[in-house]
Image (cartoon, helix red, strand yellow):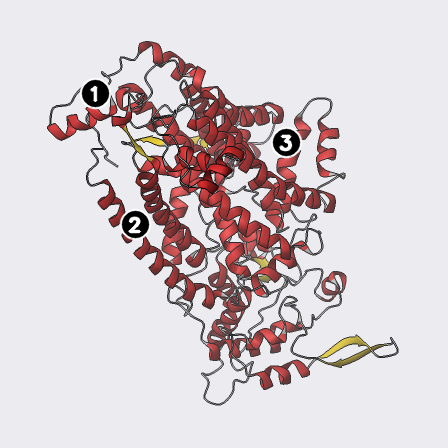
Amino acid sequence: MHGEYRYEPKNGFMKWLDSRLPIMRLLDESVLQFPTPKNLNYWFTFGGILTFMLAVQIVTGIVLAMHYVPQETMAFDSVEHIMRDVNYGWLLRYAHSNGASMFFVAVYVHIFRGLYYGSYKAPREVLWILGVIIYLLMMATGFLGYTLPWGQMSFWGATVITNFFSAIPVVGDAVTQWLWGSFAVDNSTLQRFFSLHYLLPFVIAGVVVLHIWALHVPGNNNPLGIDVKGPQDTVPFHPYYTVKDGFALAVFVLFFAALVFFAPNLLGNPDNFVPANRLVTPMHIVPEWYYLPFYAILRSVPSKLLGVILLFGGILVWAFLPWLDTSYVRSARFRPIFRQLFWVFGVVCIGLGWCGAQTPDHVIVDLGPNMTAINAAVDHATKAGKTPEEIAAVQKSAEASERVTFAVVDLSRILTIAYFAFFFPGLFLLGWVETPLPLPESISKAVLGTRGGAASGGRPLEQRG
Amino acid sequence: MRRISLAAVGLLLGITVAFADGQKEPEPQTWSWNGVFGHFDPVQLQRGYQVYKEVCSACHSMRLMAFRNLGDPGGPGFSEAQVKALAATVQVADLDDKGEPTTRPGIAADRFPSPFPNEKAARAANGGALPPDLTVITEAREGGADYVHALLLGYSDPPADMKGKMMPGMNYNPYFLNGQIAMPAPLSTDGQVTYAEGQPAATKAQMAKDVVAFLSWAAEPKMQERKTMGIKVIAFLFVLSLLLYAAYKQLWRDVDH
């Protein structure tokens, strides 16, 4: 979206440069003066926060790579060397490991903001799909990075995740061995994971450039979800949003710093302080918190192949959101039913995350003895001609073991169905049956409406940035 | 503080600090290094080092610790001369000028010597069990310092329901997984270690506290530096946020939005 503004080179050198490489024009028109809706709230500051976090991860990661050794007998010790002997190595490493968590916190807010305000709808479909690609790349990068310290959870996490690929029919084992570079997760795997972990952030940076390019064609969505009608609806990005994003970023970094300096291992797993050992399997293999909902989806089905399909389907379904959602109204503010479904969906995702952190057979509710199974055991014993004492013993042991329970795996199944049902048929049908509230005529009209007391259509702004 | 925030985030993320069935949850202790302003007590770390050296190091390595670390800021605070003297008490394998294997007294840059040359030797000497390396032990166990403390003092006779289940050579300790641990009670009597003049009496409880302090420091020797810097960073970011908020309010004052 290009406003009236055009860059004018200020002096002879700038004119000379502008006719050869219009980089200052690009910076001025696409960043500094870029017309941005004036009603963006704080949920819209997370794009800037994410760019910052990507930079933090790349900068800390490059320095960490100067000290890290991607070799199976030395990797664990080299990480401890960073923690102990490298100047401010502990800071770099804690910033990098907790930075990954904060990066995911920000991306989840960013995604759910896009969902709430309908930022995936025309004309922003490509922008949205690029976002899903970035998210997939982030997940891959985070996973690869988590293997590098070569602790127990690194090793076994890598083993579990790479084993997904063995579920592929016919070529599964070959593909898995190709990924490992070996017949099991070992030194070859670690070395290639390190190489790819260094590569992917730059791929992410490249896709982020495309993402911002695709953003700058239609311009920002906004909390009202209506199009910008003219200059009265916008402000230049700088200084209005550089300062607002800057404030939001400072608050975000405050939380980041609290984690790094005062609870750096809060989100870690103690098992990763035990060097990788292929002979000892940890009791409870859990991935990092940001994968937990998908881990729960994976484990909710007994078939490995179906589990893997659902896991990847659970991510890829987001890319189809622009077409699964049939409503022409973008913002949830004007979609009374969608707004409620949105929160239900949020609870479903958090519920899946909780399930992912538990063991699948963990009993949530014990509903009492399973009489059918107990009676069957007693019948069987009776028919086998056992003595009354033996039958009583069979009954006693059956009563102890045969219970009707509602376990984590049962909850995971319900939530997995709810997760997919939200997209289809949920959003698909909702667009046809929901009656949206009247939309405001323009952003500036809606703003003046709240100021003047009389709403000019639609709901008054709940949040004024 | 850490516990409360841990519980809060745990609730939020649905991650519960998981102690398996048949494993007793350690009682939380008040450690001097807990909390935002917490710090290690150098004298306690020195006592803890003494307990490690005289008791634990008979079976447990701390292979990533070097003698020089004992003089690092935020640690036990031994003087340079003391560090050299402590290092010189051990013999370290080396090569002489002719390339022949020899031993020499340790120097500050040497790592703590390991009690066994390799894992097989360690297992053979300990009834098949491997004494874990203690460098990062308080980070490597659920419950951290509280767990190690509870384990050290948790030995007792097996209760009635465990009596028949004890495997030969195993000791009962309810804080260990399944209640059976190969390590016999390492702190068996008061006064097992002789502390210097003017130090608290070397009771089992005191020795356990001291050695856990030492192990916690060894697991994260830069903790002091981290917390000191953290307070400054948080203060800076807080002021920065206020200034940016004021700038934002000022800038948007005349914009209807």
Q: Nearer the viewer, residue A41 or B3?
A: A41
Furthest toward the left, the residue is A453
Residue A44 against residue B226 in the figure, above or below: above
Side (left or right) of B31 relative to B109: left
* Camera sees residue A229: yes
Secondary structure of residue under mark 3 = helix
Q: CA distance from mark 2 to mark 3?
A: 47 Å
Chain on which label 1 sits: A
The residue carrying mark 1 is A458
Q: Amino acid at mark 2?
A: Leu
Q: Quadrant of residue A218?
A: top left
Marks 2 and 3 on same chain: no
- The single residue placed furthest to the front in the displayed view is A12
- Label 3 sits on residue: A164
Q: Position of residue B1 (x, y in %)?
A: 36, 59
Query: Which structural element holds mark 2?
Result: helix
Among the 4 quarters of the image, the one containing residue B53: bottom right
Residue A23 appearing in the image: no
Tell me the crowding category of disc 3: few under 14, some 14 to 19, or many 20 or more residues within 10 angstroms, Cα based: some
CA separation in Å, label 3 and label 1: 48 Å
What's under tag 1, amino acid-wise?
A: Gly
Indicate the secondary structure of the residue bearing disc 1.
loop
Residues B75 and A306: in front is B75
Q: Position of residue A140 (x, y in %)?
A: 58, 36
Residue A72 is marked as none
- Name the residue that disc number 2 marks: B244
Of marks 3 and 1, which one's residue comes earlier in the chain?
Answer: 3
Q: Residue at x 24, y 18 (%)?
A: A439
Disc nearest the viewer among 2 and 3 = 2
